Amino acid sequence: MILVTGATGVVGGEVARTLAAAGPVRVFCRDPARLPVLAPGCEVAVGSYQDHGSLLRALAGVDRAFLVTRDPGGDSDARFLRAAEAAGVRHVVKLSAYAAGEDDADDLITRWQRDCEDLVRSCGLEWTLLRPRAFMSNTLAWAGSIRSEGVVHALHPEAPSACVDPRDIAEVAVAALTSPGHAGRVHALTGPEAISAVGQTRELSRVLGRPLVCRALTAEQAAVRWSRRHPPHVVEALLRGAERQSRGGKATVDPSVTRLTGRAARSYARWAADHREAFGPVPTTAVLSGAARV
Ligand SMILES: NC(=O)c1ccc[n+]([C@@H]2O[C@H](COP(=O)([O-])OP(=O)(O)OC[C@H]3O[C@@H](n4cnc5c(N)ncnc54)[C@H](OP(=O)(O)O)[C@@H]3O)[C@@H](O)[C@H]2O)c1
């Protein structure tokens, strides 16, 4: 049996959908109402990393697990791994972050991911670490201002990132969970090119068939916006990460998605085309020519 954590989230949801369509799988979540639609027969274990008993129940009979945590500075990874060892899990595939492997990255989120990776490596289970660059789906945060005013607000709008499609991360995760050769491996995952917020705005404009403008935020303005969703220590880490991006520190393209899936990594243009409904109505007669202002 495979257990998928984070199944209400971006990558975990995709992993759960793919595995559930192919065979037995169990998902671990706090709120089943937030799960994506999964194939009938998918088992649901309700619980939380803070509840050891719920982890033990979810992990009974499980030999492989996909681990997603999101508590920078917290102990969810440690709690999960303790329960996984006790339950006799054989292999854990952990969603980490690209920056964990970069010497010049030293913000709180990166240090937390590195500490979690150390726990995974030393826990006695077989392990695989996935280190994705920023998810392309982060740009869903722009949907509101695109719908209401045709504007994208971004810090360092010209700075490139080799962002990756979460579906590619999920595909690699499924391969690591279901095929041999991934134990003890670290997979750095990027998209096929580095693209800036201005470039992403241009792609969204093209698929939506309407002009969009990309406006620069100051660091102070970005911090105010992020403070609505994150505590101060996370906002500080996000600002430091954005600053590294502005210096070109996130532009490296890695061939691992192609090597591991046997096909090219999905581009941002492809992601935008596949998610255009999220950004507003799409004209029936397609493509904008020359109207884009970015
Ligand atoms: N977003 C990026 O660009 C990016 C890039 C590189 C690496 N990463 C890494 O990827 C991971 C996921 O990031 P994300 O922000 O995109 O998250 P996400 O998709 O929202 O997924 C987080 C998942 O963790 C679950 N979760 C949180 N706390 C839990 C708890 N106490 N018990 C059980 N489940 C819990 C959430 O469930 P609920 O629905 O109940 O909240 C959700 O399913 C993080 O480790 C992040 O550092 C993200």
Image (cartoon, rainbow, N blue to C red):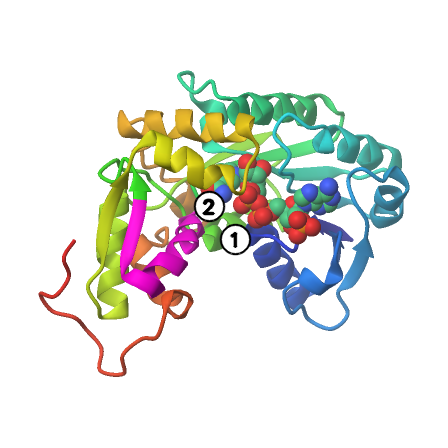
Mark 2: amino acid: Leu
Specify the label residue 260 is tagged with.
2
Q: Residue furthest left?
A: 290
Q: Who is closer to the viewer here, 260 or 87?
A: 87
Expressed as whole percent of the image width and height from the top left, the position of residue 186 reads: 53, 31
Q: Which residues are magenta?
A: 135-153
Task: Tell which quarter ligand 1 is in.
Answer: top right
Q: Is residue 284 above or below residue 21?
A: below
Residues at discs 1 and 2 in contact (Cβ within 8 Å): yes
On whether ligand 1 comes within 8 Å of the CB at mark 2, the answer is: no
Expressed as whole percent of the image width and height from the top left, the position of residue 101 reads: 47, 24
Q: Is residue 194 above or below residue 208?
A: above
**Dot 1: element:** helix
Q: Main secondary structure of the magenta part?
A: helix
Question: Mark 1 — residue?
Answer: 171
Query: What residue is at 34 percent from the left and 75 percent from the top?
Result: 281
Select label 1 or label 2 by which is in front: 1
Query: What residue is at 52 percent from the left and 48 percent from the top?
Result: 172
How many residues crowd mark 1 within 10 Å: few (<14), some (14–19), many (20+)? some
